[in-house]
Amino acid sequence: MKRFLLAVLLLVGVASPAFATTWNPSDQVNVTLSNGNLTATIASANGTVRSTTSKTSGKFCTEATNTSAVTLWTFGFANSSLVLGSNQNATTFIQAIPFDAGAPQSIWLGGTELSSGASISAAGEAITVCADFNAKTMWFTDATMRAAGNPWNNSTTASPATGTGGVSFSSMAGPYFIGFGSNGSGTAVATLNSVGPFTVTTPAGFTAWDGIPSGSNFLSDLSNAGAHPVVGFSPSKIAYSVHIYPYNVMGQTPDSPIATAAPAWNTYFGYLEIQGLAPVANLELGCSCDNSNGNLADDQAWGSAWDSYANGTAPGGPTFINNRQPMSNNWWSWGYHSGENPDGTLLSNGAINTGQQTYWSPLLYTPTGPTTGTTTWNPSDQSGISLSNNNLTASSLVSDSGVRSTIGKSTGKFCAEVNATAASNGWIWGLADAAANLANSTGSPDWLVITPFYPGIPQNIYLNNVALSTGTTLSTVPAKITGCFDLTNQLAWFTDAAMGAGVWNNSGAANPATGAGGVSFSGMSAPYYLAFGNSQASGTINSVGVLNTAGPFQVATPSGFTAWDVSTITGRALTLLFE
């Protein structure tokens, strides 16, 4: 049994935001994004970007730091009706404008100035905006405003905490997105902070846009870890930790039943396992489970829910097949601890507390099957496809067909391979996002594919039916087509024997290891799924693709990339902790 806890990021309680909001690369005009899509740069006038998440009600604050300002640098809240690139005088974008010499620190809606200050904000300042979406009122502040004695909306009396002095956007319909734009000349930059802490204390009654209201559930929160992973360690020596107890022990909700708990656990940490990003270890769990504290029903419901989730049998939760080991656990705690909750694994006479044993014993280590990929073609996510060979072999049944993989990924660098054991002209494979039409694999958006067997246009790479790369040599069945994907930067490379040794994307200069020559799929949205299909409108439909996500592949995996299913989840342990 391998132990993987050499390096552990320990997050206890409410440790990070429930959701990670960024600027949306698919919802912008004239905006360049960087820094994990947190920094937006507008190099010319008339640029706008909205956030990836929205709100319809509640009281929330967010902040943007200006690292390069122009006169009409604007930050606030926009709804989905805003025409991007048309910020000025928009009735669907309530805008704080801190740097306008003619109207410093002003708030505008629909060409009407609702509030104005006396001092222009300084470059590099953080602009904080708070909105009560129930009452449709907004406040904003920055260091210049506060230094002048006007802490919110350029007023000595305005206060989000008391609901006074807010400017109204009652004419705007929700949902409301965080918005940034510029109508001025020069370069405007805004770096988003939706998590906090902010440069000003969050007003009472308000929450950071991506925060968790105080006392809401106390679940260990790793929801931001996937987008901002720990670096500097070998992936096989990193695990992420949670603490999960029944409600009566730590006030965590939901703790059961599994139908309610699994979606919450997926959001907070389980997605790391579901997407194969990293192992999660529960380094503290336990219950008295013997009615010594009068909470037997809660203990038992939680124990049953967690056992099924950690073992990969919970509907909607992570699954652990082939070489993937279930979650490791540390049970609190070994011994007899009368009056405590949990009260220990032993009774006063040294015998085993069988109530606790009922729930820790299913978490013991057990060996699993052979080392193969954990990702397969998804029988519940296909159109016109027949699956066999444990869902690793996909065969087209109709001329226009497609199937996505069971596991999608959002960030990182991964390779996979599909073996064409039979191929018609329309044989394709590559990536598809959740919006892709599986029954229209070339004509619809959200497909990135290679067509190795189409006469006249061999080894073409298409995104949304637009050719990005073209080869000269037709691939020959059987052919193993390797694809490598930099999901973070939305770049892809394909190769096979027909292209020639060391050739990617039909170019000797293209190289995944150096990032050169990758074709961009920036129009697609994460998560990205491996996808296979037949794109031929008529004629022969005999296309077969056998998925290999674990390797080894026909070509050496490029430096910096790993196999789609090289799992860091290589062992599982149950420890009975000593107190």
Image (cartoon, rainbow, N blue to C red):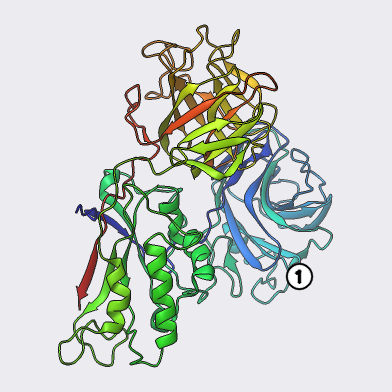
Number of numbered discs: 1
Q: Position of residue 260 (x, y in %)?
A: 54, 70
Residue lying farthest to the left in this orientation = 350
Q: Quadrant of residue 59?
A: bottom right
In terms of image quadrants, where is residue 56?
bottom right
Tell me if residue 184 comes above or below residue 456 in the rendering.
below
Residue 373 spot, x, y in % from top left:
37, 40
Residue in the foreground of this view, choosing between 551 and 514: 551
- Residue at 76% x, 43% y is 87
Q: The C terminus lies in which quarter of the figure? A: bottom left
Q: Nearer the viewer, residue 97 or 431?
A: 431
Residue 23 horizontal side relative to residue 299, left or right = right
Q: Nearer the viewer, residue 557 or 547?
A: 547
Relative height, residue 19 to residue 100 (above, below): below
Side of 567 where 102 appears, left or right: right
Q: Residues within 10 Å of mark 1 (few under 14, many from 20)?
A: some
User: What is the x, y in percent for residue 75?
Assistant: 67, 50
Indicate the secondary structure of the residue bearing disc 1: loop
Taking 314 as reference, is 159 left or right? right
Amino acid beneath label 1? Ala
Residue 210 in the figure: left or right of residue 56: left
- Residue 409 seen by the camera: no
Residue at the spot x=44%, y=58% of the render? 270
Image quadrant where one finds the N terminus: bottom left
Q: Position of residue 108 (x, y in %)?
A: 78, 53
Identify the residue under disc 1: 135
Q: Residue at x 33, y 92 (%)?
A: 292
Q: What residue is drawn where x is 43% and y is 13%?
A: 509
Q: Indicate whether 475 appears above or below 63.
A: above
Image quarter of residue 396? top right
Is residue 426 in view from this perspective?
yes
